Image (tube, rainbow, N blue to C red):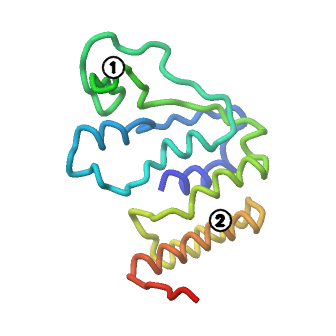
Amino acid sequence: GEVLDFLSILPYAADGCVFVLHDLNLEIPDRLLRAERRNSNQTYCCKQLFSAVKAEKFYPAALPEADFYDETSLFYLKHLANIALPNIGAFRAGPETAEESALRDVFSLLPTVWTRQLDYPAFVRLSKRLRKHYPGRLVDIFEIAYNFNRLMHHGVKLETP
């Protein structure tokens, strides 16, 4: 959802717009501290989006010195030799963010297993909106990802030749 949200609003964002993303490092505590999620194949889209987008990036200026675990802003893990990692960050969109080669990296995040599915009318609306602002070969990646996930959601198994 975060990747599609970003792609949907980027064409309307002013040059220099700052995007703030959360859950940049949520996967580590989820897997280490919550046994029921250790074997999860859940993808953490905010971290992937933050890594893939081409822009000037910012992290919190200071990390806490006290031992605590706050899953909404930062986390601090004794298991990792008391290393604190920011769970929030920002980036400033510029002309380089909207370059086709940079956008390809963002669109390439879409062919993963989605935790939520778009219904068909929402898919059609979003596809039309994306085609208005992005090259067709990039929107094709979105449509392939949608169809792959639709098949996965319905339990379709493809036969290998």
Q: Mark 1 points at which residue?
A: 81
Nearest the eye: 153 or 139: 153
Question: What's the amino acid at mark 2?
Answer: Arg
Q: Is residue 109 left or right of residue 155?
A: right
Residue 75 image offset from top left, x and y in percent: 33, 27
Question: Is 79 rendered above or below residue 140?
Answer: above
Residue 71 image offset from top left, x and y in percent: 30, 33
Q: State the count of labels.
A: 2
**Residue sitting farthest toward the front:** 161
Q: Residues within 10 Å of mark 1 (few under 14, many from 20)?
A: few
Quadrant containing the C terminus in the rendered view: bottom right
Question: What's the amino acid at mark 1?
Answer: Ala
Q: Is mark 2 on a helix, strand or loop?
A: helix
Q: Cβ–Cβ below 8 Å for labels 1 and 2?
A: no
Specify the label residue 17 is tagged with.
Answer: none
Question: Is 102 rendered above or below residue 125?
Answer: above
Q: Tell me the distance, in whole angstroms, between the alpha carbons under discs 1 and 2.
A: 47 Å
Residue drawn at x 43%, y 37% is 22
Residue drawn at x 58%, y 76% is 124
**Residue sitting farthest toward the left:** 35
Q: In this view, does 92 lie to the left or right of 121?
A: right
Instruction: Answer with the quarter of the image where residue 29 lies.
Output: top left
Question: Is 14 rendered above or below residue 6?
Answer: above
Specify the label residue 129 is tagged with.
Answer: 2
